[in-house]
């Protein structure tokens, strides 16, 4: 254990559980994704949701922001967009007779970037600057984004004609890529029943200021030498695996550690355990690995299924701390 003082976060865990239950009543089967959203928010990262249309990706992002009492905005990406459609632009104020900056939709605590792969690279790069630098540059001046700042991006894995695949640098800025699949029969019945469920009263215990104060607590969560070694060995194994052409980068190791600390805190611990590492592995690594062609050939067209099996293989080959 560490001697660093760790603030009791029982109220946080209770608030997170209430929000997970509240969203779960309206978006059936969303509990794990909501947890990953919280981890991304607490570790100052972002999340990418991928799935066919109609799986409530937009609704999930909106419900998450609403329950956190934070400013939420949505951008529907299209091929004809310009970077200023995201960042904002300079406009001439006739009364003051001078140029003024009019903020774009990126100035929000939670930003839904809907169908992010349907806009050109120059627009994606404008979003990338905001995600990484927490600011935007317009007219030679820098404008800081509100904090906390979380991007929840979505993309459709089908209808790839006329889309612009995300560059590796942009994909790597997302802590998680979560794949949404069709619900089970029971879940789909629950979806229809949930249409008449009234919205729960919004819990004000977790707002922007609370999130900012909790971020410093995440860094205090203790990670032993064995845990750090486990993370490093896992990342290095992705570079040595027979079916992986390009493995994860050292930056992934740092993100992995912070995500594991956030997950530990949300589970009521001030220390990381191996289960935290394994719990995050698929969603944290699936978009950071480039597989060899022979791996995809054996997958029958199910690229996500293949990369999931490869990640499970990597985890099984790394010795876990006791």
Image: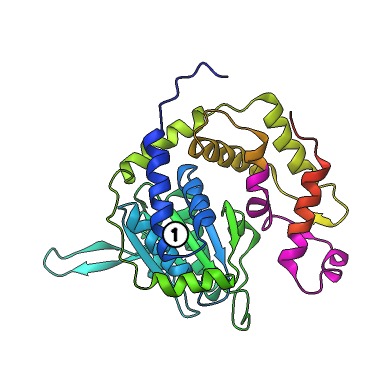
Name which residue lies at 52% across and 31% down: 269
Name the residue that disc number 1 marks.
Answer: 24
Q: Nearer the viewer, residue 64 or 88?
A: 64
Task: Point out the residue furthest to the top here.
Answer: 3
Residue 178 visible at all:
yes
Q: Which residues are magenta?
A: 278-307
Residue 275 is situated, as x and y percent measured from the top left of the image, at 65, 39
Seen in the picture, residue 33 relative to 58 is either above or below; the reply is: above
* Image coords of residue 103 (percent x, y): 30, 62
Residue 318 pos. (x, y %): 80, 39
The count of marks equals: 1
Q: In this rendered view, identify the residue nearer to me: 171 or 263.
A: 263
Please identify the quarter of the rendering in which residue 94 is found: bottom left
Q: Pick the residue in front: 90 or 71.
A: 71
Q: Residue at x 77, y 74 (%)?
A: 301
**Residue 194 vs residue 247: left or right?**
left
Q: Is residue 293 left or right of residue 43?
A: right
User: Does residue 280 lie above or below 115 as drawn?
Assistant: above
On the picture, is 80 further left or further right than 272?
left
Specify the quadrant that holds the C terminus.
top right
Q: Is any part of residue 114 visible from this angle? A: no
| Residue 176 belongs to the span the image colors magenta | no
Residue 317 vs 107, above or below: the answer is: above
Magenta segment: does it hold 296?
A: yes
Q: What colour scheme does the image use?
A: rainbow
Task: Report the quarter where the N terminus lies.
Answer: top right
Q: Residue at x 69, y 42 (%)?
A: 250
The correct choice, above or below, for 183 with respect to 264 in the image is: below
Direction from residue 216 to residue 165 in the image, left or right = right
Task: Indicate the secondary structure of the residue bearing disc 1.
Answer: helix
Q: Give x and y (percent) for residue 32.
A: 54, 54
């Amino acid at each position: 254990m560490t001697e660093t003082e760790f603030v009791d976060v029982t109220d946080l865990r209770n608030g997170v559980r209430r929000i997970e239950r509240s969203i779960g009543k309206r978006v059936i089967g969303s509990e794990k994704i909501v947890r990953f959203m919280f981890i991304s928010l607490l570790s100052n990262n972002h999340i990418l949701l991928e799935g066919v249309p109609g799986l409530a990706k937009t609704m999930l992002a909106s419900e998450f922001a609403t329950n956190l009492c934070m400013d939420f905005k949505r951008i529907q990406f299209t091929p004809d967009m310009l970077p200023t459609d995201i960042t904002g632009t300079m406009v001439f104020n006739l009364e003051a007779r001078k140029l003024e900056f009019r903020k774009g939709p990126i100035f929000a605590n939670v930003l839904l970037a809907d169908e992010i792969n349907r806009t050109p690279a120059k627009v994606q790069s404008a979003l990338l600057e905001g995600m990484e630098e927490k600011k935007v540059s317009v007219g030679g001046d820098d404008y800081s984004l509100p904090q906390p700042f979380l991007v929840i991006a979505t993309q459709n894995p089908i209808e790839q004609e006329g889309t612009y695949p995300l560059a590796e640098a942009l994909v790597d800025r997302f802590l998680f890529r979560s794949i949404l699949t069709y619900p089970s029969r029971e879940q789909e019945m629950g979806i229809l029943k949930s249409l008449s469920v009234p919205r729960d009263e919004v819990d004000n215990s977790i707002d922007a200021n609370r999130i900012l104060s909790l971020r410093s607590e995440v860094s205090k969560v203790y990670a032993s030498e064995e845990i750090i070694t486990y993370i490093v060995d896992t990342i290095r194994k992705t570079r040595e695996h027979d079916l992986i052409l390009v493995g994860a980068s050292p930056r992934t190791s740092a993100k992995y550690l912070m995500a594991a600390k956030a997950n530990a805190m949300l589970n009521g611990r001030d220390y990381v355990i191996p289960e935290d590492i394994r719990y995050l592995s698929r969603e944290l690594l699936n978009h950071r690995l480039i597989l060899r062609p022979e791996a995809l050939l054996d997958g029958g067209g199910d690229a996500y299924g293949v990369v999931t099996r490869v990640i499970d293989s990597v985890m099984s080959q790394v010795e876990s701390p006791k």
